[in-house]
Amino acid sequence: MTTRLEPHPFLQRRLHLAVGHPIRVAIYTRLAEGIRSGAFRLGEMLPRETELSAMLGVSRTPVREALMLLEEDGLLVTRRGVGRFVTDALPHGGLEQMRSFEVVLADPTMTMTVQPLRFELEKVTDFVSKRLALDPTANAWIRESLLLQNGLPIATVQEHLPAGRYLSDVSARIASELLEIAAEPRTLLASMQANGHVFTNGVCQIVATDAGPTRAKLLNVKPSAAVLIFTQTAGHGGVPLYAAKCVVAPGHGSLSIMQRNPN
């Protein structure tokens, strides 16, 4: 067990208070980010409510509410008479967070690998045009990958980014890094997030269908096998910039979506 009662450097950053959002949400987001990023170590004792409110410049009530939410989500545990501690093992997040599919589908008991299949420029499809708000005559980048657990295929991932000015006008840095990012053995989203690019306004839709001959061959299943398709879109700076389609093979297991009463 470790403790740290002196001011935590992660808490010295100014708290971002969005208009219309409860203060407890901003506090929850800051602390959850610190826990998941490792700024707060597993098993570490957090500062007390009064200390947190002083560090963050807010009243004690929203701090208490945020800590209760973190405990409900399994990120904190309370030891009566001692204080609140970061859990010894972080819960596996689900589809409620903007995450790359190799993270969403990961199993801590297995090794996940990403096998890139192709990366090229092609004319946009209706799928890409609608989700990225592109002209039907435009081009877009496509990156196709195969996700494997312990060497066995569990999903295919197709990722799409706009090309040319559609991309560089929104993020010149992503445009300049894209070829290098596409060569990495992970999904584009994972690489972009690792490079500090923040995607917001994400939406994930889920449908069930048959694998079909092409997907079936990649996933080593029958064409008639039932698969789940996860369609993910995300914005960058308020502009739709990323669209992906993940086809998950049958038998993968369950995926969680954490729910909370908005009140």
Image: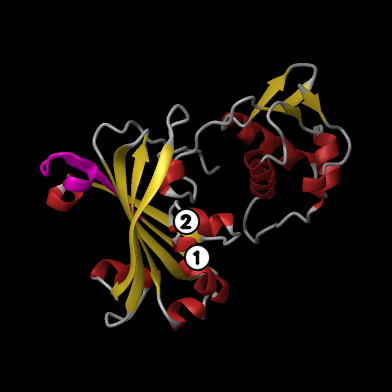
What amino acid is at disc 2?
Glu
Q: Was residue 77 drawn as part of the magenta stretch in this picture?
A: no
For the point 87% across and 41% down, the residue is 7
Image position, residue 182 (x, y; %): 44, 62
x then y, percent, for residue 213? 12, 50
Q: Are marks 2 and 1 in contact (CB under 8 Å)?
A: yes
Q: Residue at x 31, y 33 (%)?
A: 252
Q: Which residue is mark 2?
A: 184
Disc 2 residue crowd, few under 14, some 14–19, many 20+, Cα 10 Å: some
Residue 146 is situated, as x and y percent measured from the top left of the image, at 32, 48
Q: Quadrant of the N terminus?
A: top right
Task: Name the mark on residue 180.
Answer: 1
| The magenta segment | 217-231
Q: Position of residue 52 (x, y in %)?
A: 81, 40
- The answer to whether any part of residue 58 appears in the image is no
Taking the spot 43% from the left edge, 34% from the top edge, the residue there is 111
Quadrant for the C terminus in the image: top right
Describe the element under mark 2 as helix, strand or loop. loop
One can see residue 139 in this view: yes
Residue lying farthest to the right in this orientation: 6
Q: CA distance from mark 2 to mark 1?
A: 7 Å
Q: Magenta stretch: residue 227 in it? A: yes
- Drawn side of residue 222 relative to residue 252, left or right: left
Horizontally, is 93 left or right of 43 in the view?
left
